[in-house]
Amino acid sequence: MNILLGFINIVVVFSLVVLISKLFKKEGLFAWMSIATILANLTVCKMIGIFGVTTSLGNVLFASTFLATDIISEKYGKEEAKRAVYLSLFSGIAFIIITQITLLFIPSSDDIVNEAMKTLFGISVRTTIASMTMFFISNMMDIYVYNKIKDKFPKHLWLRNNVSTILCNCLENYFFNTLAFAGIFSIPVIISIATTTTIIEAIIAVCDTPFLYLAVHKKK
């Protein structure tokens, strides 16, 4: 069941990226970067089993930010793609700050959601800093690698899309898990977690290629 839902989730999320780019152009993609960053920080809390490994539901939404920046790079240039990453970083930080302030309020006797909010919005400072740092670095690196490959192989859209996304996802996973869990888990466990996550995200990255073609295709 999770495998089927996983593919449905990929199609829905990537289709929404394409749709928002068609309806609202660059502004829509900027908005999506913020939406995906906030939703990913919520859905990442839920762990699921798929293909025999444990992963989080935030992977597809995080991957959709790479698709969005690739579309922006392709249609509007790398400087606009960088602006989108800065905006999404700001949105993620604002979300964290506001939710943490919300948790500081003392609930009334009639409140029924505070405990659930504490569970959902409760964070590890170390993990959060590692996540936001690697999110920013990996997306900026994706833009750099994407455009470098574009300069050398301008006709091969699939090549720059897959190489940049898979490479940056791989680096992001290994560095994030090291920063977040060093001293908590052993090095072999950290490498194992990062490797399984990278394999799943590589599959997701390959799946986004047709959606990139749909987004940048121009009618003749």
Image (cartoon, rainbow, N blue to C red):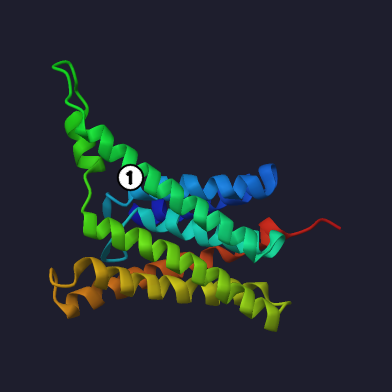
Q: In x, y percent, where is residue 36?
A: 46, 49
Q: Position of residue 109 (x, y in %)?
A: 13, 17
Q: Which image quarter: residue 154?
A: bottom right
User: Can you see residue 9?
Assistant: no
Q: Quadrant of residue 196?
A: bottom left
Q: Is residue 88 left or right of residue 75?
A: left
Please name the residue that numbered disc 1 is placed on: 96
Count of picture labels: 1
For the C terminus, which image quadrant? bottom right
User: Residue 201 at x, y = what percent?
Assistant: 41, 67
Vertical side of 215 occupied by 173: above or below: below
Q: Is 197 placed left or right of 163 in the picture?
A: left
Instruction: Report the front residue among 36 and 143.
Output: 143
Q: Give me the residue at 19% from left, 41% from top.
A: 119
Mark 1 belongs to which amino acid? Answer: Ile
Residue 22's place in the image compared with 109, above or below, is below
Image point (21%, 28%), residue name: 105
Q: Is residue 205 above or below residue 56?
A: below
Mark 1: which secondary structure?
helix
What residue appears at the point 79 percent right and 58 percent down from the top-left corner?
218
Within 10 Å of disc 1 (Cα), the crowding (few <14, some 14-19, many 20+) is: some
